[in-house]
Image: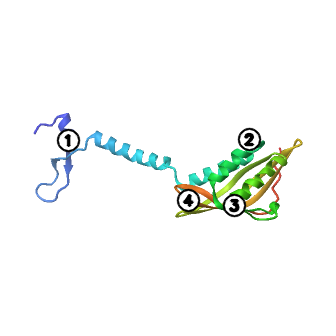
Amino acid sequence: MRFTRGAAKRLAFSIVSGAQASRLRRVKRLGRRPLVIAVAVVACAVVGYQLLPRDESRIGAVLDETCARLTQTRDAGSLSALQRFLSGATLPQVSLRAPELGEELNGVEALSARAHDLLETAPLSFALNSVEIRVSGSLARVEAELLVSVRGGGEQRREVRHTRVRLAKREEQWRIEAVEVDPISASEPEARP
C-alpha cells in the first residue's frame, strides 16, 4: 500500500497486543453530512420544545389578558368587551373575594354586574408581578402580587396585593375558577436620585 495524502487520512494506528502491534489499519470514517444532519435534528428539537406553548405560558397569557382588559375599561364599549371576555375566560361558577367588595361574588353574572363600578372610579391600572404557577393535571394555582395603580389628579397611588388564582382546564383552554385578593399591603416608595 502506498502512502498518499488521502490514504493517510483514512488510516490510523491500532493498538493491538501481540504480533500485530502498531500496524496501520483502515478506520471507517463517518462523513460530514450525517454529523450535520444529526446536529440540525437536535437543534430543531430544542427550538421546537421552546416554542411549543406550555400550560404555564397559556395560564400567564390568560391572566395578563384579564389585567389588560380591566385596565382598558373606560367607557360602555370597553365595558361590554370586558364582560364578553369574562364570560369566555372564567368558569360559570367563578368566585371573587376581595376586601373592598364587602362580599364574595359568585358567578359570571355577578362579576359582569360589578364590573360597571370600573366606570365610576378613577382610572385604574392592573398588573401582575412575582407570578408563581403550579400546574397539576387540569388544575392550576397561581400566586402573584397584584399591582393596582390609581391615576388621577396628577398623582399616582400604587397598591400591592397578594393574590391567589385557581384555574381549571376545560376544552383545552385555561379558565379562571376563583380569585382571592388579600387586603392592601404597604408598598415601598420609589427610590429617587
Residue 107, label in figure: 3
Q: Which residue is mark 4?
A: 169
Percent position of residue 59, x then y: 59, 54
Q: Secondary structure at mark 3?
A: loop
Q: Nearer the viewer, mark 1 or mark 3?
A: 3
The amino acid at mark 2 is Gly
Percent position of residue 5, x then y: 20, 34
Q: Secondary structure at mark 2?
A: helix
Up/down of 113 relative to 47, above or below: below
91 or 125: nearer the eye? 91
Q: Quadrant of residue 111?
A: bottom right
Q: Nearer the viewer, mark 4 or mark 2?
A: 2
- Left or right? Give the position of 180 relative to 22: right
Q: Which residue is mark 2?
A: 77
The amino acid at mark 4 is Lys
For the residues labelled 4 and 3, say whether their Cβ atoms are less than 8 Å apart. Answer: no
106 or 154: nearer the eye? 106
**Pointer 4 or 2: first along the chain:** 2
Q: Secondary structure at mark 1?
A: helix
- The figure's colour scheme reads rainbow
For the residues labelled 2 and 3, say whether their Cβ atoms are less than 8 Å apart. Answer: no
Between marks 1 and 3, how big is the CA–CA gap?
76 Å
